[in-house]
Image (spheres, rainbow, N blue to C red):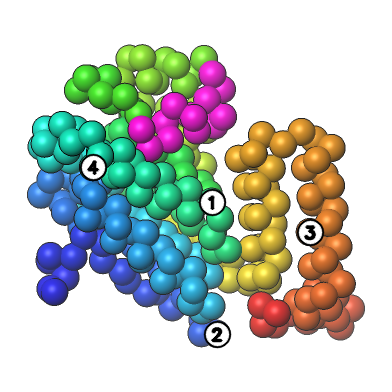
Amino acid sequence: MSLALERVVVERHGLGDECVAALLRLNRSEDLNPLDWDTVRALERRLAEADRDESVRLVLVTGTGRAFSAGGDLKAYQRLQRDREAFPAFLTDLHRTFGGIRTMRTPVVALVNGVAAAGGLELIASCDFGYAAASARIGDAHVRCGQMGGGGALTLLPRLLGPARARELVFTGRYLSAQEACSWGLVNRVVPDDELLEAGLELAREVAEASPLAVANAKFVMNSAWADGTGVDAALRLERERTSFYCVTSDDAQAGLAAFAEKRAPRFGGR
């Protein structure tokens, strides 16, 4: 299959010392990169492949053309939503794909290059965090088309933004500017449009300097406690147990301590 026909295109960017960043591009630019069923399945495969590759230190997700993703394929929905078995199955696959991002060992960062609506917003919310291009516009927009969020908007947005702001975004369907999205906490940074990819790669270089095993375990603890709504005591117990296991069993923990004592840069093997 040619790249032009692939729903999700993968680019590998070297970071030095055999570490790479995997850039996943949603690739139906003529339709604003809709998250149709084939794209959801392709994204799940590409994410899993990147997570299995030990050389990949950061996964970046972006869109081709002028949109990150305008969300679900509304044309296909006219038929899909009439099928009482197929549509729930589609949502199951969507939830598995987005939810899998939180359980990956590798950090996943959204690079929001343009319009992100509905499912596009849900993809951003499912990533560990995101950077946005200055021209990006981000909104839920489901209600504008007589829809409601089914890929996590109604669950994740109240946790990310707080209930009141989440309700405003969902009930109005309005779009936030990149700066508004940053101030609300939907993305961490806003950069000039032509610097978005480099900002993502610079982040990847920083992550590549850390122990991949420590990063994976830190992500597990933070995401597990957050997603499960765990109380502070239970979350601290999980942190204590995971950190104890990592520190007493991993080569990376000892490698970091030795490098600090010897005043040199550490070399982590992810073991």
Q: Earlier in the sequence, mark 1 or mark 4?
A: 4
Asked if the residues shown at circle 2 and circle 4 are in contact, with their CB atoms under 8 angstroms apart, the answer is no
How far apart are the two marked residues, 1 and 3, measured between alpha carbons? 17 Å
Vertical placement of residue 142 versus 27, above or below: above
Query: Where does the image place residue 132, in percent across and percent down from the top left?
Result: 39, 44
Mark 2 or 1, nearer chain start: 2
Q: Are marks 2 and 3 in contact (CB under 8 Å)?
A: no
In space, the residues marked 1 and 4 are separated at their CA atoms by 25 Å
- The magenta stretch spans which residues? 150-163
- Asked where in the image residue 228 lies, by quadrant, the reply is top right
Looking at the rendered image, the disc whose residue lies closer to the viewer, 3 or 4, is 4
Image quadrant where one finds the C terminus: bottom right
**What is the CA distance from the residue labelled 3 to the residue labelled 4?**
40 Å
> Residue, x 69% and y 61% (percent of image)?
217
Amino acid under disc 2: Asp
Is 210 situated left or right of 259 in this image?
left
Name the disc covering residue 86, or none: 4
Query: Which residue is painted at 42% across and 31% down in the image?
Result: 153
Residue 269 is labelled as: none
> Which residue has dot 3 on it?
242
Q: Which mark is residue 102?
A: 1
Residue at 43 percent of width and 78 percent of height: 14
Q: Quadrant of the N terminus?
A: bottom left
Front position in the image: 178 or 143 = 143
* Numbered label tally: 4
Q: Position of residue 245 (x, y in %)?
A: 82, 66
Return the residue nearer the eye: 21 or 250: 250
**Marks 2 and 4: which is nearer the front?**
4
The residue where tag 2 is placed is 17
* Residue 259, quarter of the rendered image: bottom right
